[in-house]
Amino acid sequence: MPTEAMRKPTGSRSMNRTAVSDLILVSAVVIIALVLLVVFSINRADGSVFEITVNGKVYGTYDLNKDTEIDVYGLCVVCVKDGEVFMKSSTCKGKDCVHSKPISKSGQTIICLPNGVVIRVPGESEVDAAI
Ligand SMILES: [Zn+2]
């Protein structure tokens, strides 16, 4: 009879308990993740510097608050204006990087895949680590 199997004292009870504690654990993890997400997005302040890397190697770190133009190996021209950085021109096909929106906040990037050029505003923690 199927009902007898359901009544087995150890089996069903411990299974239920496991399911409930799993549920609590999963909800706790989800809540913690959400809290961290909110905290991080609040902390995502405007960065003050950005970094250009070419094929994974750092080309240079620059001030976001100084209007300037940086020629990267003749591959592309990075432009800083009004506290934002954007790809002004590039030799790559498609020019997705040139069409990317200007960036200014920690964690944002503009990537030119064909040329291997990445413009990146470092996150808070990374800035601290660099100092
Ligand atoms: Zn590009």
Image (cartoon, rainbow, N blue to C red):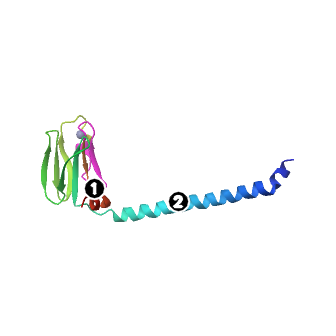
Picture residue at 66% right of the left edge, 56% below the top: 19
Q: CA distance from mark 1 to mark 2?
A: 27 Å
Q: Residue 69 shows which numbered tag?
A: none
The quadrant where ligand 1 appears is: top left
Residue 33 position, x and y percent, is: 47, 60
Q: Amino acid at mark 1?
A: Pro
Crowding at label 2, few (<14), some or many (≥20) Cα neighbours within 10 Å? few
Residue denoted by label 2: 29
Picture residue at 55% right of the left edge, 62% below the top: 28
78 left or right, relative to 123: left
Residue denoted by label 1: 122
Indicate the quadrant containing the C terminus: top left, top right, bottom left or bottom right.
bottom left
Residue 83 position, x and y percent, is: 19, 59
Q: How many numbered circles does the render carry?
A: 2
Cβ at disc 2 under 8 Å from ligand 1: no
Residue numbers of the magenta segment: 97-116
Crowding at label 1, few (<14), some or many (≥20) Cα neighbours within 10 Å? many
Residue 114 position, x and y percent, is: 25, 36
106 inside magenta stretch: yes
Residue 12 position, x and y percent, is: 76, 55
Q: Quick check: 103 above or below 96?
A: below
